[in-house]
Amino acid sequence: MIQQETCDVAVVGAGAAGLAAAAEIAKHPYRTVVLDREEQLGGILRQCIHNGFGLRYFREELTGPEYADRVVELASKPNVAFRTGCTVTEIRRLPDSSFELMTLSAADGVTYLKARAVFLAMGCRERNRGNLAIPGSRPAGVFTAGAAQKLLNTEGMLPGRSAVIVGSGDIGLIMARRLRWSGVEVKAVIEIMPYPSGLTRNVVQCLNDFGIPLYLEHAVVNIAGRERIQHVDVAPLDNGIPQLDRQFRIGCDTVLFSVGLIPENELSVRLGVELNPATGGAVVDANLQTSVPGVFAGGNVLHVHDLVDFVSEESAEAGRSIVKYLAGELRSEENRAAVESNLKYVIPNRFNHGEKCTFSFRPLIVSDAATLEAELNGRPIWKRKFTYIKPAEMLKIDLSAEQLNEPGTLVFRLKEEA
């Protein structure tokens, strides 16, 4: 039987982003429904049993499950309903500017949920071997780092006995340490870039402290094995080209891929949301509202974050914007925010003049002396020197209402000091 339900806000995703937004909206007299395809609230945090979470958002160090419990508690209010084991298959904008979400679940079958506003918090999925097109046979023992993490931390099963990790993203670095703790021999981490892709603290704590080799500017050029992986072939890179005459072999029975994340925006695209090629997420204004009025986005579905604390901060801000939207008090201007030298992107992509705004950036360089500058209509309004910059670590700054005192175009540049 097809069911129907109404609410003020539909939140798609019950991880750190969705729960932070729901908690903010719950402070006001609006009904929110949070939907997630998993059976348990908290998202990926449930399988991240290491500590290091919450230092910014909760002012104390927590494990992933502890952080999840905190944000679930914040969002668990009488005007918030949770629908777990529930997959959103389609979102449509109706003629009255409200939204209809089609959901499927084993418990309730097909349900149509009508909402006045939607918050997109679907997170990311991992890139895998297919995305990299690594040649070789197709034996068992190939995992994404997140899949191996879930297998070990929530199912209690080892993915293998000896492993090579492809890519030095944070999940891969953390899994190198976790595997070593569990008795798995981690032979090497292979990274194509000349610098690690993960946070410095994870390189130190997860690789250096355990003597795990990190091969920078190297690539896996072959995965070999019959029923199970037997070895991988690794070659150094010269201007991005594998030097096959210098390749070497590493014996292993398991390969983990930690080679980046892809925002889960299939629903967004079908809804008509404009995407930013630089992030794979939505183009958003100062309120984190997408190109579709009434649809907001935050967290990793918008752009990949380093810290879950940043996800919660950003999504809580989106929740406050949704409250303004429902009250008819949201202000949105088309003043453009753009990046030039040494920056991949800026979020948000628009700003309101005369209002404070937080901007997030992804640098493209590694430097121990760089200056981030902002110009409004060609006029310098702000700059800050940084003693350490790397692509793995996001930059966040606040510009005041006084600095953003006129409409126009805001341009950010990252200049490396001589």
Image: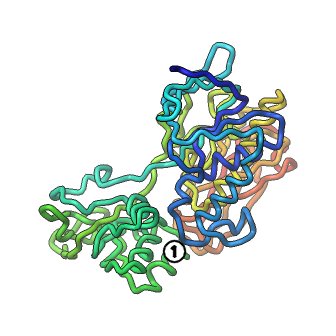
In this picture, is 79 found above or below 176? above
Instruction: Check the image and name the residue furthest to the left.
Output: 226
In the image, taking residue 379 as reference, residue 165 lies left or right, namely left
Residue 227 spot, x, y in % from top left: 14, 61
- At a point 53% along the width and 63% down the height, the residue shown is 391
- At a point 55% along the width and 76% down the height, the residue shown is 201
Foreground pick, 324 / 3: 3
In the image, taking residue 164 as reference, residue 99 lies left or right, namely right
In this picture, is 181 found above or below 160? below
Q: Residues within 10 Å of mark 1 (few under 14, many from 20)?
A: many
Q: Quadrant of residue 179?
A: bottom left
SS category of the residue bearing label 1: helix
In the image, taking residue 114 as reference, residue 187 lies left or right, namely left
Res. 271 visible in picture: no
Q: Quadrant of the C terminus?
A: bottom right
- At a point 72% along the width and 58% down the height, the residue shown is 397
Foreground pick, 61 / 235: 61
Residue 322 spot, x, y in % from top left: 75, 36
- At a point 39% along the width and 79% down the height, the residue shown is 180
Res. 202 visible in picture: yes
Q: How many marks?
A: 1
Foreground pick, 56 / 221: 56
Q: Quadrant of residue 164?
A: bottom left
Amino acid type for the residue under numbered disc 1: Asn
| Residue to which mark 1 is pinned | 202
Residue 71 spot, x, y in % from top left: 69, 55
In this picture, is 185 found above or below 67? below
Instruction: Check the image and name the residue furthest to the right.
Output: 402
In the image, taking residue 399 as reference, residue 181 lies left or right, namely left
